[in-house]
């Protein structure tokens, strides 16, 4: 819609304006740029790419979606998302 276009510059006819396989809404909610392919970047420096964070979020039931690209420790337990998901 017009708000999406004028506020974020995204294409309201597309769910993923930059074609990085991350939905524009999720990118905006997680302070990513919906206009550039930032899937391989690691915004919160937790060892998981933005795309990995999105995949983890997307594959969870809606009531269990805690993953955030803005926080290295999305659940606040003192361990980074990477540490929690890659137990050695």
Image (tube, rainbow, N blue to C red):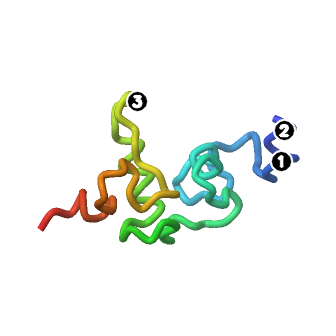
Residue that numbered label 3 is attached to: 62
Residue contact at pointers 2 and 3, CB within 8 angstroms:
no
Q: Which mark is residue 7?
A: 1
For residue 1, side relative to residue 18 (left or right) = right
Lower position in the chain sequence, tag 1 or tag 3: 1
For residue 20, side relative to residue 68 (left or right) = right
**Foreground residue among 61 and 22:** 61
Up the image or down, 44 lies above or below 60; here it is below
Residue drawn at point x = 33 percent, y = 62 percent: 80
List x then y, in percent, for residue 22.
53, 52
Secondary structure at numbered mark 2: helix
Up the image or down, 2 lies above or below 49; here it is above
Label 1 to label 3: alpha-carbon separation: 27 Å
- Mark 3, residues whose alpha carbon is within 10 Å: few (<14), some, or many (≥20)? few
List x then y, in percent, for residue 11.
76, 47
Residue that numbered label 2 is attached to: 3
Quarter the C terminus occupies: bottom left
Label 2 to label 1: alpha-carbon separation: 6 Å
């Amino acid at each position: 819609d017009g708000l999406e276009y004028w506020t974020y510059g995204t294409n309201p006819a597309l769910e993923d304006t930059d074609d990085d396989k991350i939905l524009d809404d999720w990118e905006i909610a997680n302070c990513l740029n919906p206009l550039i392919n930032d899937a391989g970047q690691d915004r919160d420096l937790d060892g998981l790419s933005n795309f990995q964070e999105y995949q983890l979020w997307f594959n969870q039931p809606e009531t269990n979606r805690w993953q955030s690209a803005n926080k290295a420790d999305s659940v606040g337990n003192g361990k980074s998302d990477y540490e929690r998901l890659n137990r050695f």
